[in-house]
Amino acid sequence: MTQTEQSAGKIVILTGAGISAESGLGTFRDAAGLWAQHRIEDVATPEAFARNPALVHQFYNARRIQAAAAKPNAAHKALRHLTENWPGDVVLVTQNVDGLHEAAGTTDVIHMHGQLDQALCATCGHRWSAPMEMRVGEACPRCAQLTGRPDIVWFGEMPYHMEDIYGHLAQADIFAAIGTSGQVYPAAGFVEETQVAGALTVELNLEPSAVVSRFEETHFGPASATVPAWVDALLQEAGSS
Ligand code: APR
């Protein structure tokens, strides 16, 4: 890493459903959010899938179709611009299961809650590109068992890539949480990890999150406005906009 990159520091970003809201994808806990329309215990737990796989597939099929038709907004594009122009390291961790960061051109996105466009075999752990609509008894292309499921981390399951994520948080010089209510752990605890590491902590959200008191800097408003402004200011400061 060059001197400039070293001095520019490492930025770790966590995004939540709020960054995709202006792309037309529902958040979870806003007034008309997904958890106001569906009970978590009916569609987002391993027990729900065992009890009524058709209902769970129906829930994720609808979200997969909607996400596939959605377009990245100015906030997703601003984060891609940051990863391309920041002289140091930028790591993007998302709780979102849509592919809008990738659609905006960001690579190496860490999906800690899985991805709608992936299927997972509950028997052998094989992953494959999910069909737009998954069915009950989806056959695994590797082991042929009829145990395909959405590759989504359900409540009660361990989020993915946690070791990597904690390693990045420990090295963060700047930590930004964007579009997340700070109500679901372990993601809601990331800000504390980076505070311990001495990072500058920044919250960019429509309104104060449940963990807003842990952030040194806050920018409230729609992500399509706050994120591009924040990225421009960062790059200006680093002299590389
Ligand atoms: N711009 C910025 N923030 C927004 C916008 C917007 N246009 N619209 C909504 N928000 C904010 C809301 O104020 C809220 O604080 O985004 C946040 C979304 O919070 P949640 O709906 O709780 O979503 P999230 O924090 O991503 O949920 C975390 O919970 O249900 C699980 O696995 C699911 O990944 C999800 C996790």
Image (tube, rainbow, N blue to C red):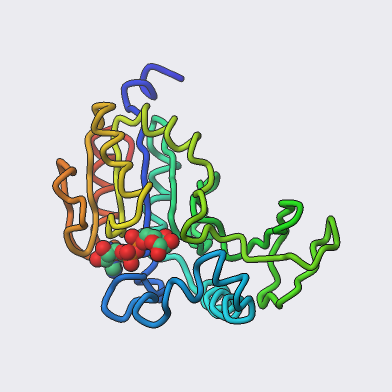
Q: In which quarter of the image is the C terminus?
A: top left
Q: Residue at x 22, y 64 (%)?
A: 206
User: Residue at left 74%, top 53%?
Assistant: 126
Residue at left offset 52%, top offset 72%: 67
> How many circles with numbers are drawn on the protein?
0
Q: Is 127 left or right of 31, judged from the image as shown? A: right
Q: Where is residue 123 in the image (x, y as percent from the top left)?
A: 75, 56
Q: In this view, does 124 lie above or below 174?
A: below
Q: Is residue 239 visible?
A: no
Residue farthest along the top direction in this orientation? 3
Q: Which of 166 and 54 is in front in this view?
A: 54
Q: Position of residue 120 (x, y in %)?
A: 68, 59
Q: Position of residue 205 (x, y in %)?
A: 24, 59
Q: In this view, does 177 lie to the left or right of 158?
A: left
Q: In this view, does 147 lie to the left or right of 204?
A: right
Residue 216 seen anywhere in this rendered image of the structure: yes
Residue at left offset 41%, top offset 57%: 77
> Considering only vertical position in the picture, is 236 above or below 43?
above
107 or 211, nearer to the observer: 211
Ligand 1 resides in the quarter of the picture at: bottom left
